[in-house]
Amino acid sequence: MLFESPETTIGFWLAVGFAAFVGTLVHLVKSPKGTLGFPLAFMLALYVMHIGAIVHLVPGYFHQNNAFLFGIGYTRISVAKGIQVSMIGYVAMAFAIWLTTYFRQNYSLEFDRARYPARFLRTAERSMLIVGSIFFVAILVAPELTAVPSLGAVVFSSRSLLPIAICFALLRRVWLGEGLSMWQIGALTAAIPLANLLGTAILAEALATVIFIGCFWLAIVGRRLGVWRALLALMLGLYVFLYLSINYLLVRGEFREIVWQQTSTLEQRVDGLFDALSKFTPLSTDDEDQLFALDARLNQALFTGMAVEKLEYQPDTYENGSTLLAYMFSFVPRIIWVDKPVRGGSEFLTRHTGYQASRETTYGIGPFFEFYVNFGLWGVIVFSMMFAALVRWIDLRCYRAMVYGRMTEAVPLAVGALALVQPLSTMSSVFSSFYASIIIGFIIAKMMERYLDIRTFAEAQAKISRV
């Protein structure tokens, strides 16, 4: 560690990570090559999942006073080691995003209103909203579909079309100044986590979607707002996120008892949700329960630190690339590859930390943990750069496609980018979702080509006008 005190180490690396995030924000907003905010969403989601380490800087905070945290068996030194490794990877990601921008062709792209007939963007938005809503509602009504091998990945990825449709609505509002108002778009965005809460009482994936949409909006209005206003908007959004997340974590047990009852009605779930909301309290460093919740759920550094400590004593237990190799072939359906390995989760966490995690509970490990247990610190640096470079490349390609009206190319890329915003998943899981999302997005885009490609749309309209 850099410092003798674990508190100083934690504070230093959290500050370094925040500086890397701000630097990424400034770079993306000012880049003449444009952005749709995908790297920003990717970086923000990762930072949020490590921000819980800040509780160890609160005077008098002692995590072992909580029975659950005491049972994990980590120390403040574990957190310091974990946050150091994670933020080194985080800085490497920020650097890769910057490099990828300047390694691409030297061009400057701006949206041109003359290129986009209002009718085209209107039709594209409405068609995507309809298709996206159908898939989203289908999963809420029949969640058992996601449990079917191969089919589950397809159905699960299809619901990502709804947030992409909301992004289309944002484009129409910001670029053409028409369509859904900002409050209507905000209400539609908020409906995603609310529907997830009432349907499954699971919030994590829906929040990643909200982050994605929020960063998309920030990217397309960033220059107009200016860097400082954009940063202020992000800070306010982060506070609201923490307020809602921490308070929900404190009451979710009672709420889940209602939702997970097979006989519970929609009215009972809504009443349960309002009852949970009534128990929300302002954030306070004097509230130990809030600090425990923040440490337990938004402090991924503690598991990474435990892995660092275990590998210091057992250096022969590195994975040496075995889990990272698996993600390259995660596109192969389980229906074909029956013995396809499942890596990650409780068993993987136990193997590399010693913590006897319950198999009935889902544990996320995140990219930095997985990169480290494969190749150590250099693995974290190299693979973090590769991962972030992929996100920025998709961002640049998708932005260019949207500027030229090639929504048939933009839709699969955007859906794929959303699949990469999974800060707690294994690489195998992330890329399995990514491949499925790209395929689904491509199929849907080709089926709706006359509404999503400006040239095809113009040709169709010309034929109609001649008739």
Image (cartoon, rainbow, N blue to C red):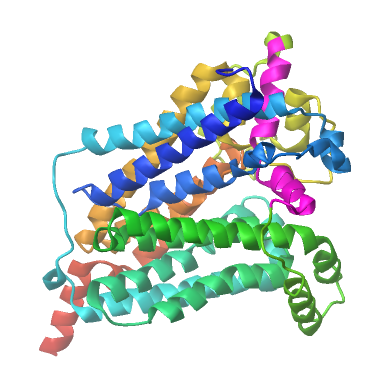
- What residue do we see at 56% from left, 47% from top? 48
The magenta stretch is 285-312
Side of 424 relative to 33 (left or right): right
The picture places residue 283, in percent across and down from the top left corner, at: 66, 59
Main SS, magenta residues: helix
Q: Nearer the viewer, residue 347 or 144?
A: 347
Tell me the quadrant of the picture where the N terminus can be found: top right
Side of 67 relative to 292 (left or right): right
- What residue do we see at 84% from left, 71% from top? 258
The picture places residue 361, in percent across and down from the top left corner, at: 80, 46
The picture places residue 231, in percent across and down from the top left corner, at: 39, 54
Tell me where residue 453 sits by quadrant. Answer: bottom left
Q: Is any part of residue 155 visible from this angle?
A: no
Q: Residue furthest bottom?
A: 467
Q: Nearer the viewer, residue 222 or 328?
A: 222
Was residue 148 drawn as part of the magenta stretch in this picture?
no
- What residue do we see at 36% from left, 42% from top? 24
Q: Residue furthest front?
A: 59
Give the answer, above or below, for where 138 lies relative to 19.
below
Tell me where residue 85 sits by quadrant. Answer: top right
- What residue do we see at 35% from left, 32% from top? 96
Tell me where residue 102 sits by quadrant. Answer: top left
Give the answer, above or below, for where 362 lies relative to 381.
below
